[in-house]
Amino acid sequence: MSITIGIDLGTTNSAVAWHDGVSVEIIETSSGKTLLPSVVSIDDKDRIVVGHQAQKQIRRHMRPEYVFTNIKSHIGMPFIEGEDYGLQITNVEGERWFRGPNDLDYSPVELSAEILKTLKASAERRLGKEVTQAVIAVPAYFNNIRVEKTREAGKLAGFRKVIIRTEPELAAMAYGLDKEKMSRIAVYDLGGGTFDFVLLRAGDRRLEYLAKLGDDQLGGYLYDRAIQKWLVDAYRQDEQREISKIGLLRLAPAIEDAKKELTDFDSAEIAQVGVFFDSDLGDTLDVNYTIAREKFETLVESFTRQTVEITKRALQMANKTVRDVDEVLLVGGMTRVPSVRKAVASLFGEAKLRDRENPDLVVAKGAAIAAAIEDGRSPGRTSYNHVTAQPFGLIGKHDTVHMLVPAGTPYGQKSKVSIFHLGTAEDGQTVIPIAIVQGDSRSARECTVLARYDHKVPAGPARSEKVDIEVMVDEEGQLIVAGVDCRTGQTLRILEP
Ligand code: AMP
């Protein structure tokens, strides 16, 4: 019999849960905690360390440059020259990797696999048997490459089968909404690194997506970074010197702690001794600042506003208004921030907000429920109608994107096949370049390239050669693109899962 566990692989924290057929248990880490920090470090003996131990390395001032955080925000993301990703990120064949000691670089996939291995080991210790499968949650807004990289990390961690499900739908399952009577549920999910907003019709063992939108580069770390920028500016003004890049790595945990403290208090202290060494002074310097909640709220206001705009856009896409929404689930640790909660409440009304479930653990809990259904430990199956979160397109002239499949297209609908014609644009052209992308922009630069295919044709006058493109989104949300050379009838396998 297969043993499937539920995993929330988060940007900041991860969690693993087990459903025995009756109830859900969040499995504790070896340090006795329910959350495992999504942190991987390389220690002074070049060993890989995961979780709390890895995090401690920063506080102990031990190789902070090799303590890797926010791994999920880099998985499957392209490295764009000229962008500042900080001290640790390096360009490996166009991807973002983490720079380790001894000229060794680590991919986000292998670092994520280390986190997953740790969670798998905790589950096996608790259950006393081998765990072979996992339901792993991903943001609803993740593009296909990022989903596949997450699956790859699961396989690398030793899971024979990885079932990918989206975080908001798992949260809805943890609330048991798929089993109640039909209603319209919004899930507002602001985590450490990503924002998802989905509108679902849930109930009678069915979850139906009405809208799915988000931003996979908008989350708690941006709020932390805003505090960091404020601190750097204040320090520069007061001390006439810069906090070093290593100093910023050392300050990161203190900054995140301060943000959390501001949830419950009007002000928070960011204090750290020996933050960095100043060679002019020949001394290590301390940092000690207090930030008021009001200041924090003005620093981060634009991020919260962005989430509200995405929410409104998603409702519009579904032709719905806030009045059509029965309940709003608050998911992700960032929904504890009072100004974030207030923004959601002023849009939907306080009475509709639901936060009964712990926002840090609700996704893992839902994943465990899905895992139990998968193994047959729990009866009943919830059916879904998944829809695409980001449009698919084809790169045309001047790097503009021609839409192939719009956002909101249901998975697995053969009738939704689109046909496009591509041809030679100039005399003597011997190649028809075909590039398939995914993203919300009309500019190819801002989208993720899923496939490039150069179709060779004999030289001739412009428009003499033509390819028909056929597109379909399969049951798993994977895009399948095939082409037919209109002259020879040759089939081109442009993109296959
Ligand atoms: P998640 O990805 O759901 O684990 O969310 C983690 C994010 O929520 C991180 O950015 C945390 O700093 C943030 N977070 C967790 N608890 C709190 C809190 N009590 N107040 C403010 N932010 C929090």
Image (cartoon, helix red, strand yellow):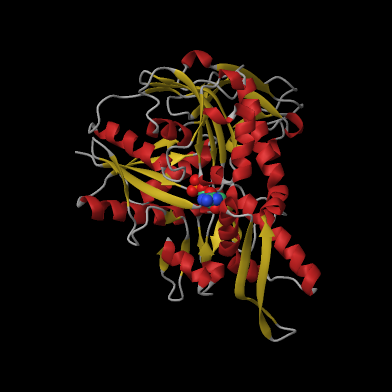
User: Front-most of 186 and 469?
Assistant: 186
* 422 with respect to 13 (left or right): right
| Residue drawn at x 47%, y 37% as measured from the top left | 355
Residue 323 visible in the picture: yes
Residue 101 shows up from this direction: no
x, y percentage for residue 411? 47, 22
Q: Which residue is drawn at 73% across and 85% down?
A: 281
Residue 267 picture location, percent across and down: 64, 58
Q: Extreme top residue here?
A: 415
Q: In which quarter of the image is residue 47?
A: bottom left
Quadrant in which residue 190 is drawn: top right
Please state, as top left, top right, bottom left or bottom right, where the C terminus lies in the image.
Answer: top left
Relative vertical location of residue 168 with respect to residue 277 in this rendering, above or below: above
Q: Which residue appears at 74% of the width and 68% of the height?
A: 235
**Along the line of sight, the residue nearer the viewer: 53 or 28:** 28
Q: In this view, does 434 lie above or below 119?
A: above
- Residue 146 lies left or right of residue 357; in this view the side is right
The quarter holding residue 171 reads top left
Rendered location of residue 286, percent (x, y): 65, 76
Compared with 432, 89 (above or below) is below
Residue 68, horizontal then vertical, whole percent: 52, 61
Work out whether residue 12 or residue 429 is closer to the camera in this orientation and state it: 12
